[in-house]
Amino acid sequence: MQSVGAQEGIRSIDVKVAVLLLALGLAGYARQYNAEALAQAKLGVSLSHQEKYREAIPVYKRAIAIDPTLPGIYLNLGLAYFKLGEFRPALAAFEKENARSRSDQAETLLAMTHFGLGEYRRAAQLLKPLASAQPQNTELAYLLAKSYMWSGQYDEAMDLFKTLLSRDPDSVAAHMLMGEALDAQRRTADAAAEFEAAAKEAPGQPDVHFGLGYLYWEQKRYDDAEREFRRELENNPKNGQATAYLGDVLLKTGRKGDALPLLKEAARLRPDLHVVHVDLGILYVEGKQTDAAIGAFRAAIRTDPESFDAHYRLARLYSQLGRKAEADAEFATVQKLHEKQTEEPLMKISGPSSR
């Protein structure tokens, strides 16, 4: 299942990270720390509270340059980067903070940042002891479960999902995550049952109808998939994934005129989705819009360099146009991909970009 980005993946399980107040009562540190550094730190906190993270970062850096021993200063700098989705510099700041003063808070932020970077195995390593120490913290448990799942540790993920469902059988998030894990094990019908339970419990839950529709789409149950994608779009008209796959369903069921505007809109909302560009390329070829078709297939290859379908269709198009050298190059790539092609191993509602 398609990605909505690592930062959305974190938000989707509702892990709440408030901007930290730098050593509450900063005035009390006036004798111990440089006054100018404290003033800069307070300004950074004020900007962060206004969600002006881009402006807060250089202010925090000025405070660090003056006095790098200020309590919590690296934590606040890391949070500003984190809130902007700039996970690599956030990680460096959190590592400095944790090395200086280890805490569960810093460890949690480190884990979340590794998650945001797609380093799921490392995130799981950090989260496991934190989740064990806080068994009632379901947000940590969900983040750990996703880290297990997206690092291929399916047995650990399934055990954790079962625990979460035993605590709360009506947990929508647990049903959705269980569905993703089952799909990863090619148990598509069982995965659909989990999403059906989630959709029944909370029909307004973001992505629940898209997830169910995607599972129907995998089974080529296009009428059912169309219904669910339309329900998702009723809840969120700007859902790029639902728009893209609804367009794909319409194309596959012969409604090309209706598919084209949806796919164009999906390309605007989610230009990272491979399926959008392949489908647009198909429609442009049929409409004899050769340059647009080449551009679409190339865009599909940019989003997924190992796209067998896009390379093959582009090769055929070049061949029809008499562009032999380019066609031969694409056919050679197709042959290499054919030898090693494997299916996408995991449906993802939120996570790294895929098809």
Image (tube, rainbow, N blue to C red):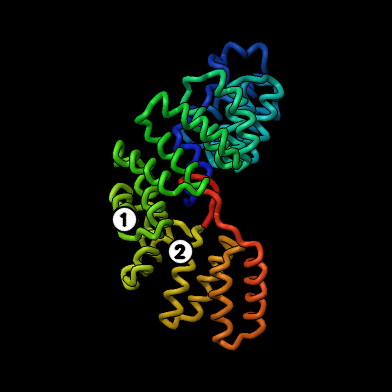
Residue designated by label 2: 276
Q: What is the quadrant of residue 308 in the picture?
A: bottom right
Under circle 2, the secondary element is: helix
Residue 105 location, x and y as percent?
A: 58, 23
Give the residue drawn at x 43%, y 56%: 218
220, above or below 105, in the image? below
In the image, 151 versus 219, the foreground residue is: 219
Amino acid type, callout 1: Asp
In the image, 332 versus 103, the foreground residue is: 332
Give the residue drawn at x 56%, y 18%: 133
Amino acid type, callout 2: Val
Residue designated by label 1: 224
Q: How many marks?
A: 2
Residue 32 in sight here? yes
Q: Are marks 1 and 2 in contact (CB under 8 Å)?
A: no
Under circle 1, the secondary element is: helix
Q: CA distance from mark 1 to mark 2?
A: 20 Å
| Apparent side of residue 267 relative to residue 157 in the rendered image (left or right) | left
Residue 47 in sight here? no
